[in-house]
Image (cartoon, rainbow, N blue to C red):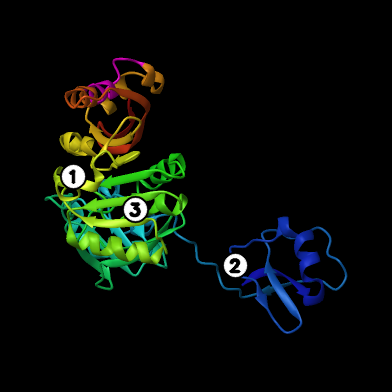
Amino acid sequence: MVKCLKIPLKRAEIIRKKFDTYITYNYLPEKGKKYIYFALRKIPDKIPKGIEIINKALKKREKKPKNIKDILKNLMNEKELNELVSSFEVLNTIAIIEIPNSLEKYEQQIGNAVMQMHKNIKTVLKKETGMSGKFRIRKVKVITGEKNFVTTYKENSCLFKLDISNMFYSTKLSTDRKRIAEQSGRNENILVPFAGYGPFAITIAKKNPKTKVVGIELNPEAVKYFEENIKLNKLNNCKALLGDASKIVEKYPEFKKWADRIIMPLPKNALDFLPYVLKCAKTGTILHIYAFDSKAGEYLNAQHLNAFDSKEYPFERKIKKVEIIAKKYGFKTKLLNKKLVRPYAPNVFQICLDIQII
């Protein structure tokens, strides 16, 4: 039983606002035919005519957990909770989480906690491996919910359907996809090798209806979804092609010196493909090259974030490598922008270089 204000329904909102500092919302208000009852944290000094204070059994409001650690705190000890990775990727109704080997015995409970925190989640997948193989596929396992790997999610006003078990995916580049889409010119020819299921190509094409965007992808399953995503987004200025980035011009000679802009979202070894991609470039072409830098993190830890302008900064090694490769093929380069995209691993950052062929 708790002390309650008994308020006539006709005066409910006026009285509630007036006595809000006295009311506790740890209990759910109860509404009857003529009155509504609010639990009190303390008794007001003066009560208006027609309002009563009574004892009533109100239902206690359930306290919503702040995160999955909050849900699992009674199951795991402090050391285990500290090992728990509480952040995870969500693609519509599917969550993809990492579980350390030491916590594998709790994987189902962890999956249940994710679903408890996010009511829209229908499937929880556990990452079993890193991205590997020529198609950059990660092995995943259903630990809770429906056995499903296919989902459709929204990003930058675009719809994307994919099969998480059969292709590379990452929603963590959504901000950078938007950035490049906003930089792209109205009438540009844009080439996206390593296009996957189309997130870069489609974002650019939808933002710029007068561009011509071509994505090339080696994984046939990803190309199938890329084509479906073009239809989903009702685009007529975007094309998905099956092919190897090292043989673009050989297979599709029409792209020789065709591109005004080339996006290379393959951070592990994009520079290895630069000699082949440059065959599609011409004077003025802008390259957006993604790469991993194992020195960026340790340099930032030792210096300051304002070190971006320093010649010693690790970006310079990648910039120099692009310059050397381009020179072999008769091109000069001009750096337009350099940025840290995201932390990837301890002391490893994903970076992006925007470089123009001159």
Residue to which mark 3 is pinned: 199
Compare marks 1 and 2 and give the one earlier in the sequence. 2
- The answer to whether one can see residue 170 in this image is no
Q: CA distance from mark 1 to mark 3?
A: 23 Å
Position of 90 with respect to 44 (left or right) is: left
Rendered location of residue 126, percent (x, y): 23, 59
**Which numbered mark, 1 or 2, is in the foreground of this view?**
1
The span picked out in magenta is 310-320
Magenta-span inclusion, residue 316: yes
Rendered location of residue 136, percent (x, y): 17, 51
Instruction: Say what amino acid the circle numbered 2 marks.
Output: Tyr
**Disc 2 secondary structure class:** loop
Dots 2 and 3: beta carbons under 8 Å?
no
Position of 75 with respect to 7 (left or right) is: left
Residue at the right extreme? 49
**Which numbered mark, 1 or 3, is in the foreground of this view?**
1
Rendered location of residue 235, percent (x, y): 41, 60
Instruction: Say what amino acid the circle numbered 1 marks.
Output: Val
Residue at the top extreme? 311
Task: Tell me the quarter of the image containing the C terminus.
Answer: top left
Looking at this view, is 12 or 250 the one in front?
A: 250
Residue to which mark 2 is pinned: 27
- The answer to whether one can see residue 59 in this image is yes
Residue to which mark 1 is pinned: 249
**Disc 3 secondary structure class:** helix
**Disc 1 secondary structure class:** helix
Task: Tell me the quarter of the image containing the N terminus.
Answer: bottom right
Rendered location of residue 192, percent (x, y): 29, 46
Q: Residue at left 31%, top 57%? A: 239
